[in-house]
Amino acid sequence: MFKKLALTVAIAGTAALAPTATQAAELDKPLKKNMWDEDVHTIQKDLKELGFFNYDKSTGYFGSITHTGVKNFQKDYDLKPTGTVDQETADVLEEATEMIERGDRGKAVQHLQKHLAEMKLYNYKVDGIFGPITEKAVENFQNKNSLQVDGIAGPETKAALFNLNEAAKKAEPVKEEAESTEATTTSEPEEAEASAADEEKTMTMQATAYTADCNGCSGVTATGIDLNKNPDQKVIAVDPNVIPLGTEVYVEGYGRAVAGDTGGAINGNKIDLYMQSQDKAEQFGVQQVEVTILD
């Protein structure tokens, strides 16, 4: 989902806690409602793992259900409930889905301590630092619930402690949740509707890449788009018998684009992605990608 940056976390003045290596998620941009993005897939999977995304699969579309899930996650983890995945939310979400163990610190640890405190297993301040007291509390919880006693909050321990399995069983159907969301309007596609339609409109295709900067190239596509004057335009060459010219699509790893060009070798389930430079086109090579028809 994100570029990974290795960080070292040292807890000053706490001799009992050893430094630990962790990962920080670097977002290219905030993820907001009504966006299509590859990173949204991972956000949805992480939210689902934590009981905040009530749909059967990730869609890549940031609709009402994802927006509500993000807001609920932010409230539960003491973040500002904006419904937008900013850098802080991405970091905490990633921490929350990983194993939480001695030496860790942050809002995911704080959230863990709150639940342990509610069960009268943790009797210290909720400081977000996973030290020996937190570790002992986790061990006591594991022992009481017939779990492996290792002092680490892994998937099974978190599911039991946060009642994730029960939350999933009690969750309302997706349709009802979408209809009750205040931000929903009839003019915008609902996440459930969009993903159901996508299932019928998504194809796996062979993708290559091309550029307008080549010998003999005019830079003008079959539909009249001048790529030399509009270098930031996202355009794909298609077989019009498969994807009609002018169709808006979402291409995995490339983003939203228009089917605005054709090519002699582009037949059947093949597409050619416009790139700004020859180097980028060559680096892309040949890949299998998911292509979703948006209109």
Image: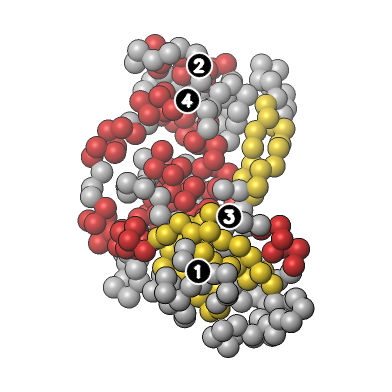
Location of the C terminus by quadrant is bottom left
Residue 103: image quadrant is top right
Three-letter amino acid code at the position of disc 2: Gly
Q: What residue type is labelled 3?
A: Gln
What amino acid is labelled 1 in the image? Asn
- In terms of image quadrants, where is residue 280? bottom right
* Rendered view: 193 above or below 127: below
Whether residue 136 sits left or right of residue 106 in the image: it is left
Please indicate, yes or no, whether residue 16 appears anywhere in the rendered image.
Answer: yes
Which residue is under mark 3?
287
Helix, strand or loop at mark 3: strand
User: With respect to residue 76, does 125 lie above or below?
Assistant: above
Q: Do the residues labelled 2 and 4 touch (CB within 8 Å)?
A: no
Assess disc 2: are there few (<14), some (14-19) or many (≥20) residues with their C-alpha within 10 Å of its C-alpha. many
In this rendered view, identify the residue nearer to me: 36 or 96. 36
Coloration of the structure image: secondary structure
Give the CA distance from mark 4 to mark 3. 35 Å
In this rendering, the label closer to the viewer, 4 or 3: 3
Residue in front for this viewpoint, 231 or 90: 231
Sequence-earlier tag: 2 or 3: 2
Disc 1: which residue = 267
* Label 1 neighbour load within 10 Å: few <14, some 14-19, many 20+: some
Q: Are marks 3 and 1 in contact (CB under 8 Å)?
A: no
Q: Where is residue 91 in the image (x, y as percent from the top left)?
A: 58, 44
